[in-house]
Image: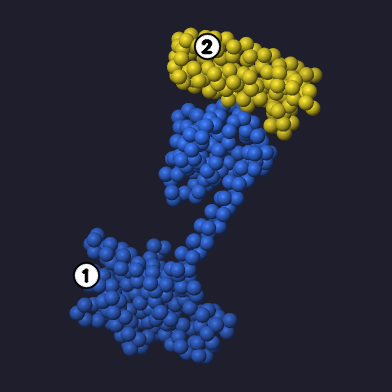
Chain colours: A yellow, B blue
Amino acid sequence: MTQQTDRSSLLAVNLPELLARVDNDIDLVRELIGIFQDEFPLLLRLLQESVACEDAKRVETTSHGLRGMFSSLSAMPAAALAGRLEELGREGKTSGLAGALLLFEHEAANVRSELNAYLAEANS
Amino acid sequence: MKIVIADDEAISRRSLEKTLAREGYEVIAVDNGRSALQQLSLPDGPRLALLDWMMPELNGPEVCAAVRGQPDRPYVHIVLLTSKGSKEDVVAGLESGADDYLIKPWDPAELAARLQVGQRILQLEDRLVEARETMRFKATHDPLTSLFNRGVIVDLLARELSRTRRENGCTVIMLGDLDHFKSVNDSCGHVVGDEVLRSVARRLLSSVRSYDFVGRYGGEEFLIVLNNCESAQAVARAEAVRNGIANRPIQTSRGPLPITMSVGVLSSRDWDLRLVEEILGEVDAALYRAKAAGRNRVVFAKPTAVCNVPQPLAK
């Protein structure tokens, strides 16, 4: 049990926690991942554009949405990195945005990869 | 029970929708604060709300404040969903009118428990409102006939007379008294007497308009206030009321009883600027004359003379 918890904390998505939150409704998890796959690319592009033009306010609002999205998927490391971007946006600290975005993009890619792997396994 | 979920983040909204539907709620899911407020403002709208803090158009606290600004509506139990966890944020959310808050990501067991608390509070509120309404009804209505009691019907008369003077309108006042009612009580008993009073009350209500006032003025006396009724119609209206009692016997547990009513009637236009007590004195005098003239009749009170209206005799 301890081993599983430790392993979960190392992963981009805490799937046991996500499944527990939806009462092990695998169909719902599939649906949520589908929503993520539809909406995330648009939000990421919006965030990238906002960072590129140093629009701090838009960085804050877009990152807030992304933080909620990753948090709902029990992807807490990515949620924390989105939270960092939100904080920088709120404080108007545009100099740190590019670095924070890079870290976030990397973690978000891990989330996508794990969710895709989960879907492939669940569908097999 | 209906619940509205407002969250602009689609994954969170869908998870909540499915989780709460599984718990037996009738879920209305919207993606912004304005739509949530529209749902909560509907006549039969949800009384439980789960609102995200940050949303487009109206945020959660703004929806709370708008809902609390509608004091005549049934109470809505509002839970704010927030990823803001600081004490200042929690205080700000509760001060905006929220009843509770949940920090994202929410735990399903905690969510269900907090909404159950909300349902208990709403049930308690419903019982309190029901008790208040029952007490209000008892304080304003006659327990036997459910008509307005004497205090209320006299207050309504005073209010109506003031309005009539202000708007230069006309109010017609009738005071009716059942003829020989004591003999009903004496010969058939008070239970039957009560049955008669209840039937008379129903007939009086059915012979006036929905916005007229009918009250039990005394034992077998009834005061009727007809709003916006001109003098020319007063006698016809009073005659309709009298006839509504006399035209067919009242069915009681001791069989049908022929009952009649004498009526004094007065138009405020003829007695302008008189006090309520004086108006009541004049209509009572007209009623007295109706009794003296043979009962089961209407007598119209005029300031200079009393005009006896020819009436059909009792059957």
Instruction: Look at the picture and state if B109 lies above or below B263.
Output: above
Mark 2 → mark 1, Cα distance in angstroms: 80 Å
Residue B10: name its quadrant.
top right
- The residue beneath circle 1 is B272
Question: Mark 2 falls on what kind of element?
Answer: helix
Left or right for A21, reference B297? right
Question: Mark 1 falls on what kind of element?
Answer: loop
Instruction: Look at the picture and state if B73 lies above or below A27.
Output: below
Instruction: Look at the picture and state if B117 lies above or below B28.
Output: below
Whether labels 2 and 1 share one chain: no
Instruction: Look at the picture and state if A78 lies above or below B25.
Output: above
The residue under the point 33% across, 89% down is: B292
> What crowding class fits label 1: few (fewer than 14 Cα within 10 Å), some (14-19), or many (20 or more)?
some
Towards the viewer: B77 or B314:
B77
Q: Amino acid at mark 2?
A: Gln
The residue under the point 57% across, 84% down is: B254
Towards the viewer: B180 or B141:
B141
Residue A25: name its quadrant.
top right
Q: Quarter of the image containing the C terminus of chain B?
A: bottom left
Chain of the residue under the numbered disc 1 shown in the image: B
Q: Is residue B6 visible?
A: no
Q: Nearer the viewer, mark 2 or mark 1?
A: 2
Across and down, in percent, residue A115 comes to 70, 18
Left or right for A2, reference A110? right
Please say if the residues under marks 2 and 1 sit with CB atoms less than 8 Å apart.
no
Across and down, in percent, residue A23 comes to 72, 33
Q: Amino acid at mark 1?
A: Asp
Q: Which mark is residue A48?
A: 2
The residue under the point 53% across, 58% down is: B128
Q: Is residue B175 visible?
A: yes
The residue under the point 67% across, 38% down is: B109
The number of discs equals 2
